Amino acid sequence: MLITEFDFTLIANYFSALDRQGPGGKEETLKALSFITDLPAKPRIADLGCGTGFQTSVLASSMDCSVIAMDLLPEMVEGVKARIKRDNLEDKVTALVGSMTELPFRPNEFDVFWAEGSIYNIGFEKGLTEWRKFIKPGGYVAVSECCWLTNKRPDDMDYFLQNFPEIDNVSEKLRIMEQAGYLPVAHFVLPEYCWVINYYAQMETRMRDFLEENNNSMAAQKFVDLMKKDILVYERHKEYFGYVFFIGQKCD
């Protein structure tokens, strides 16, 4: 089964309890932010597919800005609200339920569009193309996306083709970014600890409680089995693929 075949309620129940919903880390968010320069006073940032807002809090804590954090799942947005209240960021962050395919924004409204591990929901090319109109001239986009890190491929490709249908070489992602109307500013590969320590360790800890909360149902067990397979695939094939952060600047 693919994760998209599971009920959204089950997905939200599992992931909303995690500190972050994908590979990444505070240092990596700040590193990506360091390539974004010449921002106006109090820039406006849209954080799309924000999950429970780990990176939202990092962004809002690191600068004088306003952030719109949006996620499709209400449970995630409730997690954002709890986090920003805990971190005393309620004056900087607004959390909304919404789809990145139907954004309620005005043209040229934002200085930065941010999407850590979430642009795959709309597609890399489609997201960069459609989001461009909401970014001010000279504004930025910062996204992380799963990419091949070598020209070699693992033997068992079915998992990747099913779960990462748009996975491609870094050079192809940069070409798409340029064609979508951005100047590629920087890109870097997320280190292994962003997967193993910051993400998978929490996932494994979550599994037992998740099964108990869902009465050890067949659907819950299948979901846990899928998460275990995700971890196993990474352990076996991490030399082939990983997340890459891309930072681009909107061109005239």
Image (cartoon, rainbow, N blue to C red):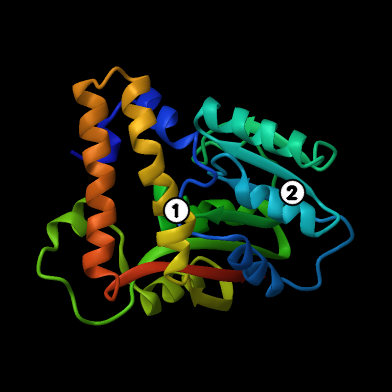
Q: Is residue 176 left or right of residue 208?
A: right
Q: Residue at x 73, y 64 (%)?
A: 137
Front-lying residue, 208 or 89:
208
Residue 204: x percent and y percent?
36, 45
Residue 5: x percent and y percent?
25, 32
Q: Residue at x 60, y 32 (%)?
A: 79
Q: Residue at x 16, y 71 (%)?
A: 154
Residue type at mark 1: give it: Tyr
Please identify the quadrant where the C terminus is shown: bottom right
Report the mark closest to the observer, 1 or 2.
Answer: 1
What residue would you read off at disc 2?
109
What residue would you read off at disc 1?
199
Q: Is residue 131 left or right of residue 220?
A: right
Residue 159: x percent and y percent?
18, 55
Q: Secondary structure at mark 1?
A: helix
Q: Secondary structure at mark 2?
A: loop
Q: Which mark is residue 143?
A: none
Task: Give the vertical position of 104 relative to 63 (above or below).
Answer: above
**Is residue 196 at least partly visible in the picture?**
yes
* Residue 222, quarter of picture: top left
